[in-house]
Image (cartoon, helix red, strand yellow):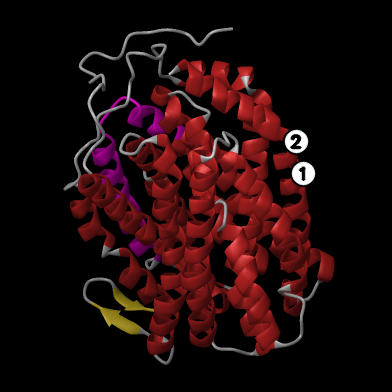
């Protein structure tokens, strides 16, 4: 069955010209990466504030997990697809800038929360705003680089997530340490706020300036080849394409979602594990974990992305999926052990390769969805990828750990065992899925490339 045909939308440029200059392309990646850093700071900072929020609001680990995961993920995932469908038709730069403004204000609004539900709604707002970023960014980057350089470009963009998480832990830990001794902080108009509420104002409001910076980007020309079969955009058309290539898409979506579950559940609860098990302060835990994240996540995703491009240049059309398989296999021993050892130094030592391999495949994951999807469906396909990745990874990952702690182990100090249980099951299952779908992924990528 051939792909449905349609003419490009009215006014849509049909690209037969060369790629943008390297300066323009990498400037776009740099600005979008900084936007991604900002988004991860805003979504991750909650992980350092678990204990003061629990104390002030009187809530459980399970409720904290809902704030960290489900509240953020539910509309982040649901809004991602309609926003991405819009990005396949409209100006992607403007969509990103509007989203940044929204999530920055929503992060600051977390500092106004006076109870569980008001904080829950503010976290929902963060998710709605951040839904505008990655699908549009993936599409813009894919229209700025040829395929043999796409893994590298998307890998560098994706580094922003882990730099953001590292900065959130380091700077957040320092901010928590600075304000921790205050009983209340008086702000104009707002009045008295708790130290943890002040942290949300500090990390949220600078995003308004960054949204203005995004507006300096030029919207890339969409790559619609006159030699290729003309493509329809739209959600229904994409579903037809995905059904035709169901095994490749199933393996990709499910496999990377499980890797996302491993990463997000570990990231959400690792600071709490270190505070409870090794009696560190939030500032100390933030400094250690943030430093490891900055170094090993950055190196991990860049090495994985360069490996993906290297394999692609040598004719491996399944290079991006193969990198996912390598990541999952290498994660298995560290997923089981990093949070179950009794020594702080051994825990930190094992956390380094755990972070390296849990971020190793994310540039390849983003590139993979591009190479098996026709151009005018890419933003929407990216949103579907992010829907599953974030609903499972962010929405369920932290909550699975909390449920194990509250109801299986029934001990706050057992959060490390809960992390190990969730991560230790996720990694081998992801590896099996990648192995199962590798051949189908290769056929889909080759067929699409040959049609161009």
Q: Residue 317's spot in the image, x, y percent?
A: 56, 33
* Residue 89 appears in the rendering: yes
Q: Which mark is residue 432?
A: 1
Q: Give the SS element for disc 1.
A: helix
Determine if the magenta segment contains residue 84: yes
Q: Is residue 440 above or below residue 92?
A: above
Q: Which residue in the structure is indicated by mark 2? A: 436
Q: Residue 371's spot in the image, x, y percent?
A: 49, 32
| Residue at image coords 68%, 80% | 347
Q: Is residue 327 above or below residue 84?
A: below
The reply to whether callout 1 and callout 2 are in contact (CB within 8 Å) is: yes
Identify the magenta region.
81-110
Q: Residue 4's spot in the image, x, y percent?
A: 47, 8
Q: Nearer the viewer, residue 346 or 180?
A: 346
Separation of marks 1 and 2 at Cα, in angstroms: 6 Å
Q: Is residue 245 above or below residue 439?
A: above
Determine if the magenta segment contains residue 261: no
Specify the quadrant that holds the N terminus: top right
Q: Is residue 164 left or right of residue 410?
A: left
Q: Is residue 235 left or right of residue 360?
A: left
Q: Is residue 47 above or below residue 81?
A: below
Q: Nearer the viewer, residue 117 or 122?
A: 122
Query: Farthest residue toward the left?
Result: 216
| Residue at image coords 38%, 55% | 36
* Residue 53 appears in the rendering: no
Q: Is residue 252 left or right of residue 401?
A: left
């Amino acid at each position: 069955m051939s792909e449905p045909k349609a003419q490009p939308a009215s006014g849509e440029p049909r690209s037969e010209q060369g790629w943008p200059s390297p300066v323009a392309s990498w400037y776009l990646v740099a600005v979008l990466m900084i936007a991604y850093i900002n988004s991860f700071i805003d979504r991750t900072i909650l992980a350092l504030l678990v204990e003061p929020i629990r104390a002030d609001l009187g809530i459980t680990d399970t409720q904290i997990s809902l704030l960290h995961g489900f509240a953020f993920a539910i509309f982040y995932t649901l809004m991602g697809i309609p926003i991405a469908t819009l990005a396949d038709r409209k100006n992607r730069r403007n969509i990103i800038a509007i989203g940044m403004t929204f999530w920055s204000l929503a992060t600051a609004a977390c500092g106004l929360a006076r109870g569980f539900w008001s904080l829950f709604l503010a976290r929902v707002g963060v998710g709605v705003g951040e839904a505008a970023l990655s699908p549009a960014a993936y599409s813009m980057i894919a229209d700025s680089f040829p395929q043999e350089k796409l893994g590298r470009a998307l890998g560098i963009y994706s580094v922003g997530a882990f730099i953001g998480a590292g900065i959130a832990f380091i700077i957040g830990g320092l901010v928590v340490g600075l304000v921790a001794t205050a009983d209340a902080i008086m702000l104009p108009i707002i009045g008295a706020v708790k130290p943890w509420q002040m942290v949300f104002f500090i990390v949220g409001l600078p995003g308004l300036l960054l949204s203005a910076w995004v507006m300096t980007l030029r919207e890339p020309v969409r790559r619609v080849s006159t030699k290729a079969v003309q493509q329809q955009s739209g959600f229904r058309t994409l579903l037809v394409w995905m059904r035709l290539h169901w095994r490749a898409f199933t393996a990709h979506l499910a496999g990377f979602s499980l890797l996302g579950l491993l990463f997000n559940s570990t990231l959400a609860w690792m600071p709490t594990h270190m505070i409870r098990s090794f009696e560190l302060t939030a500032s100390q835990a933030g400094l250690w974990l943030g430093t490891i994240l900055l170094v090993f996540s950055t190196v991990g995703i860049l090495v994985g992305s360069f490996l993906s491009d290297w394999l692609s240049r040598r004719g491996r059309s399944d290079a991006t999926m193969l990198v996912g398989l390598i990541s999952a296999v290498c994660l298995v021993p560290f997923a089981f052990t990093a949070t179950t050892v009794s020594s702080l130094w051994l825990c930190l030592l094992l956390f380094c390769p755990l972070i390296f391999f849990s971020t190793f495949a994310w540039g390849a994951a983003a590139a993979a969805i591009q190479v098996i999807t026709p151009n005018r469906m890419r933003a929407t396909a990216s949103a579907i990828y992010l829907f599953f990745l974030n609903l499972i990874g962010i929405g369920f990952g932290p909550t699975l750990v909390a449920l194990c702690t509250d109801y299986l182990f029934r001990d706050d100090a057992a959060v490390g065992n809960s992390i190990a249980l969730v991560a230790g099951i996720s990694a081998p299952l992801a590896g099996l899925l990648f192995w199962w779908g590798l051949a189908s992924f290769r056929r889909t990528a080759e067929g699409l490339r040959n049609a161009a």
